[in-house]
Image: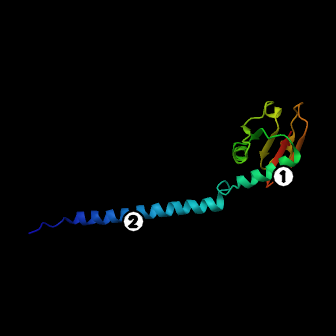
Amino acid sequence: PKPQNPSYLNNLNLSKSNFNLFIILLLIAYPAAYSIRSVYFDKRVGYDGKKIAEDINKEWISLSKSELKHVGFSEWYAGNLSYHLKSRPKVFLEDNENFYKQPAIVISKGVGPSLCNKNYKNLRNIIYKKIDDHDVCFIF
């Protein structure tokens, strides 16, 4: 005769199948919930850095004959701008006089024209523009 399993083993097998079902649901539900959150609530996932860089570059070309050398001071906005521009300008994260020695762009959001209020003596042209909901200061 074949020995019978004690009753607690039957419960244990049932627990394993519930656990496996829970893990499978978790592996499906978590990425789905994260995707929904990212699409509707996280602006950086849908950040169109390439288009913004193209628009800013067109404006730069219309204003200056110099090659863009520096961008600053926001790690996110300046970094994206530098990444998408062919010239790959150097990103400065802090305001200093070395930044203004070469043609530059300062890009930010929610600052307004005060972004261009710099008192360095060597600056010839400073122009503020609002491009794609970004505050952009052209320095050349």
Callouts 1 and 2 close, C-beta under 8 Å: no
Q: Along the polypeptide, which appears first: circle 1 or circle 2? A: 2
Q: Residue at x 81, y 53 (%)?
A: 131
Viewer-proximal residue among 111 and 45: 45
Label 1: which residue? Answer: 130
Residue 17, located in which quarter of the rendered image?
bottom left
Residue 5, located in which quarter of the rendered image?
bottom left
**From what the image shows, is residue 53 above or below residue 11?**
above
Please state which amino acid type lies under the numbered disc 2.
Answer: Leu
Measured as percent of width and height from the top left, residue 72 is found at 76, 40
Neighbour tally class for label 2: few under 14, some 14-19, many 20 plus, Cα within 10 Å: few
Mark on residue 48?
none
**From what the image shows, is residue 118 above or below residue 5?**
above
Label 2: which residue? Answer: 21
Q: Report whether residue 112 is seen.
A: no
Neighbour tally class for label 1: few under 14, some 14-19, many 20 plus, Cα within 10 Å: some
Q: Secondary structure at mark 1?
A: strand
Q: Nearer the viewer, mark 1 or mark 2?
A: 1
Q: Quadrant of the C terminus?
A: top right
Q: Is residue 124 left or right of residue 22?
A: right
What is the C-alpha distance between the residues marked 1 and 2?
Answer: 52 Å
**From what the image shows, is residue 65 above or below residue 2?**
above
Please state which amino acid type lies under the numbered disc 1.
Answer: Lys
Q: Is residue 133 left or right of residue 25?
A: right
Residue at the farthest bottom position: 1
Q: Report whether residue 7 is seen.
A: yes
